[in-house]
Amino acid sequence: MSPMRLIVLGCSGSGPGPGSPASGYLVEAGGTRLTLDLGNGTFGALQRHLDPWQLDAAVFSHLHADHCSDFASLTVFRRYHPSPPYDATARKLDVHAPHEAPDRFAAAYAASAAERAQADLSDVFAFHALSDGGSLTVGDATVRTTAVDHPCETYALRVEHGGRTLVYSGDTGPCDGLVTAARGADVLLCEASWPHTCEQYSEPPSGVHLSGRQAGEHAAAAGVGRLLLTHVPAWYDAADLVVEAKAAFDGPVDVVHDGGVYDV
């Protein structure tokens, strides 16, 4: 059995689709369990795989809604559950995220300006800001963070445990940072948000997302063992993006699916 396992809570790009919640992943590394992003619908999916009280940390690549909107549901669960398994004042869940996360999450949780003025999530969470080239320890796992190219502060997340490595691209356009983060990884979980050419453009816009071909190119440049494509919007055919990726990367390529479980 692999020392690390990836469970897909949701993988639809830019928002929930008819067959999947938005972006969110559960990683099991030995006795450690952490989430990478919690987009629309993923907190419900999480509860099919894990008692949320058993979560050791929540890590966020960036703060676009399709990657973090279910944080509000996690807040309600931890604040108002009638029978937490421990004294709620004795343990706060560690949240590792871009530096604006405490304010952004509090604003999303509040229903009005007046409520926002009194919103403070520090009763149930301990926030830790990510940084380019940073490293953090979550139980048995090490998570390394590398800035990537997206319109807001965004990080690729490299999870290491038991001699195995999983890298999650977050959302990014083509960049050296993703190659650096993914160098030699066993598995690269990489966004592929659009085809390389389509009616809207002859070349993909820069600084936003990757095409299927670009995901394959980054996997090849980093020398990863396996490429898993994710974040495909409902209006594109994932099979087309797999074909593009395979043309640029000669290792195994698959597109993940809602509820999928992958050994790293």
Image (tube, rainbow, N blue to C red):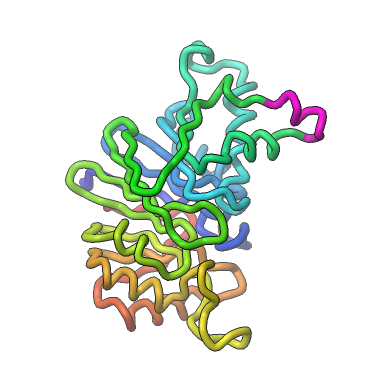
Residue situated in front as seen by the camera: 166 or 98: 98
Q: Is residue 62 above or below residue 82?
A: below
Q: Position of residue 56 (x, y in %)?
A: 40, 30
Q: Horizontal placement of 7 versus 72: left or right?
A: left
Question: Residue at (34%, 37%) from the top-left corner?
Answer: 136
Residue situated in front as seen by the camera: 147 or 123: 147
Q: Position of residue 60 (x, y in %)?
A: 48, 45
Q: Horizontal placement of 198 versus 146: left or right?
A: right
Find the magenta span and give its range. Answer: 111-119
Q: Position of residue 167 (x, y in %)?
A: 33, 54
Question: Residue at (40%, 63%) from the top-left corner?
Answer: 190
Q: Is residue 131 above or below residue 83?
A: below
Residue 161, by quadrant, is top left
Residue situated in front as seen by the camera: 138 or 243: 138
Residue 218, by quadrant, is bottom left
Most common SS among magenta residues: helix
Q: Position of residue 186 (x, y in %)?
A: 24, 58
Count of numbered circles in the view: 0
Question: Residue at (63%, 36%) from the top-left corner?
Answer: 103
Q: Horizontal placement of 13 versus 49: left or right?
A: right
Residue 115 in magenta stretch: yes
Question: Residue at (52%, 79%) from the top-left corner?
Answer: 204
Q: Is residue 5 above or below residue 78?
A: below
